[in-house]
Image (cartoon, helix red, strand yellow):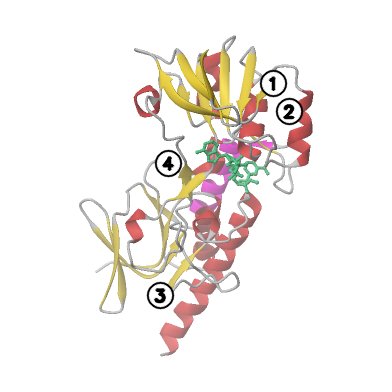
């Protein structure tokens, strides 16, 4: 039976850094990623706050370099989705649709995925005017008018990016105060192409083959109006990617993995969690990478205790 020392689930900043550290420590390391590596960073246009890049760096570029670096030391990337986890005869079993993999330790680094607004028409119009990734879809909206939903850093940063293509970007926020950082707020307020629509939510999205209009509701006045628009970009936070975990380790009430912020140990010995999937994580690339590194070092210590037992 082929047994990995470290099996990492998720190929974002946390997972790829865990891979780099584990494989560089000569541990037999694999990393599962269901589609492609990079995680949320691959969906980000410009990364301005990752140390070492004073001019900024694009998300896809930094993600690709991280993958290259992890592979260079031996991390094997397996493009399969983990469906369930088990512990059997002192080993962990990682189940995909048609296969089982075995490992002495697991690092959960599956991150989080973009949350939907959750209104009628949204699902049907995704890819037909509704998007969750400005880097991927922004160029389709050249000379068009778009809405960005949300008031956090993602909405502001991606809204600013989208002004490169769109003639007008309406940021629709459910309150009259933004959650995003001061520097991004300042830039968004200064940008001539951005207009804020405060205290407003989208009630529904409409269009036959592509998005044509949305119903906007002012939550203070409870007034609804039709609003013609070419695109809607949704940035209303994230939900953890933890369905496959079930009750294998303890999760918090929102579904994030409970793990110690120093040892990164979960409720199950030999299983660690790093990055945005962990409850209480600071959701930044640099901290995700730091946690991935720390979790890999902890996995290494744990493996040493197994050898001496
Ligand atoms: P976030 O900070 O959780 O903000 C989500 C925004 O969406 C909030 O303004 C929230 O409104 C709104 N919202 C939530 N559910 C909604 C719904 N159902 N309908 C309408 N609006 C809804 O999420 P994020 O912006 O994706 O950021 C996530 C984390 O990543 C943060 O810690 C952020 O700092 C970090 N991040 C950092 C950078 C950077 O450093 N440049 C870039 C991107 C993200 P309320 O304000 O009313 O709650």
Mark 3: which secondary structure?
A: loop
- Furthest-top residue in this view: 143
Question: Under 8 Å from ligand 1: the CB of mark 2?
Answer: no
Q: From the viewer's perspective, is residue 11 above or below residue 130?
A: below
Q: Are marks 1 and 2 in contact (CB under 8 Å)?
A: yes
Mark 4 to mark 2: distance in Å?
31 Å
Q: Earlier in the sequence, mark 1 or mark 3?
A: 1
Tell me the chief SS of the magenta region. helix
Q: Is residue 303 magenta?
A: no
**Residue occupied by mark 1:** 194
Q: Earlier in the sequence, mark 3 or mark 4?
A: 4
Q: Nearer the viewer, mark 1 or mark 3?
A: 1
Q: What is the crowding at mark 2: few (fewer than 14 residues within 10 Å), some, or many (at least 20)?
A: many
Q: Earlier in the sequence, mark 4 or mark 2?
A: 4
Indicate the quadrant of ligand 1 in the picture: top right
**Residue occupied by mark 3:** 268
**Residue occupied by mark 4:** 36
């Amino acid at each position: 039976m082929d047994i990995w020392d470290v099996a990492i689930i998720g190929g974002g900043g946390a997972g790829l850094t865990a891979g780099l550290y584990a494989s560089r420590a000569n541990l037999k390391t694999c990393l599962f990623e269901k589609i492609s590596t990079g995680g949320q960073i691959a969906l980000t246009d410009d990364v301005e706050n990752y140390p070492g890049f004073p001019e900024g760096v694009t998300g896809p570029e930094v993600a690709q370099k991280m993958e290259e670096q992890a592979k260079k030391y031996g991390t094997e990337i397996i493009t399969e989705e983990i469906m369930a986890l088990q512990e059997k005869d002192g080993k962990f079993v990682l189940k995909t649709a048609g296969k089982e993999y075995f490992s002495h330790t697991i690092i959960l680094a599956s991150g989080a995925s973009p949350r939907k607004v959750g209104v009628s028409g949204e699902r049907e119009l995704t890819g037909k005017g509704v998007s969750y990734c400005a880097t991927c879809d922004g160029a389709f909206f050249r000379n068009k008018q778009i809405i960005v939903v949300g008031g956090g850093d993602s909405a502001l940063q991606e809204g600013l990016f989208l002004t490169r293509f769109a003639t007008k970007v309406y940021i629709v926020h459910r309150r009259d105060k933004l959650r995003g950082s001061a520097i991004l707020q300042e830039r968004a307020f200064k940008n001539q192409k951005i207009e804020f629509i405060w205290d407003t939510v989208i009630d529904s999205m409409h269009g036959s083959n592509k998005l044509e209009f949305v119903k906007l509701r002012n939550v203070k006045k409870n007034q609804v109006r039709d609003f013609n628009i070419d695109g809607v970009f949704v940035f209303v936070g994230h939900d953890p990617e933890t369905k496959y975990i079930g009750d294998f380790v303890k999760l918090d009430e929102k579904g994030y993995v409970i793990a110690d912020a120093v040892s990164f140990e979960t409720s199950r010995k030999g299983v660690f969690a790093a990055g945005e999937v962990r409850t209480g994580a600071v959701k930044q690339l640099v901290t995700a990478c730091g946690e991935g590194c720390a979790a890999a070092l902890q996995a290494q210590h744990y493996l040493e205790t197994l050898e001496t037992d």
